[in-house]
Image: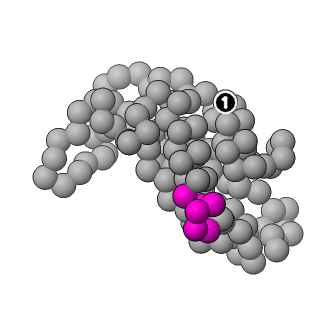
Amino acid sequence: MPIVDIQLVCQEGHDTPPVPTQALADVLGRALGSAPGRTWVRVQTLDSTAYAENEALVGAHELPVFVTVLQAHPAQGAALAAEVMAVTEAVAACVGRPAERVHVQYAAAAAGRQAFGGKLVE
């Protein structure tokens, strides 16, 4: 049931590059060990004028990608570290950004808090 939200910060005044959403869903599904149709990916863009880092100017080649992963039961310890690396590398490769600029956040476990079609995830 992983739901992955991806937000790409894009350069002001430039056309947003096409985002390979299906390719992202496919590689993230593999990285997260999901069966087909079980990893859902939502992609949004954020204009660089709406993004800043304190005391620093961010160049076009440094624009980040923010990734939030929601799972019923997130991995822990070494398994989580390996999963983070797999997610980071998959997103970086698909969107053409350096892995160092892909920032992954895991939401709290969704079990008991997320429902699909009125059915609570256990």
* Residue pictured at 61% horizontal, 27% vertical: 20
Q: In terms of depth relative to the viewer, which is nearer, 29 or 9?
A: 29
Indicate yes or no whether the magenta region holds residue 46: no
Residue 94 point in image, percent of width and height: 56, 30
In which quadrant of the rendered image does the C terminus lie? bottom right
User: Which SS does the magenta portion mostly show?
Assistant: helix
Residue reaching furthest to the left: 55
Q: In terms of depth relative to the viewer, which is nearer, 61 or 90?
A: 90
* Residue pictured at 31% horizontal, 45% vertical: 50
| Left or right: residue 101 compared with residue 44 | left
Residue 101 point in image, percent of width and height: 38, 42
Which colour assignment does the render follow?
one colour
Question: What kind of element bears circle 1?
Answer: helix
In which quadrant of the rendered image does the N terminus lie? bottom right
Residue 69 point in image, percent of width and height: 60, 56
What amino acid is at disc 1? Ala
Residue 26 point in image, percent of width and height: 72, 35
- In this rendering, does residue 12 appear at all? no
The segment highlighted magenta reads 76-81
| Left or right: residue 30 compared with residue 5 | right
From this view, report whether residue 20 is shown above or below residue 29. Answer: above
From this view, report whether residue 13 is shown above or below residue 98. Answer: above
* Residue pictured at 44% horizontal, 44% vertical: 102
Residue assigned mark 1: 23
Indicate yes or no whether the magenta region holds residue 79: yes
Q: In terms of depth relative to the viewer, which is nearer, 103 or 52?
A: 103
Dot 1, how many residues are within 10 Å of its Cα: few (below 14), some (14-19), or many (20+)? some
From this view, report whether residue 2 is shown above or below residue 11. Answer: below
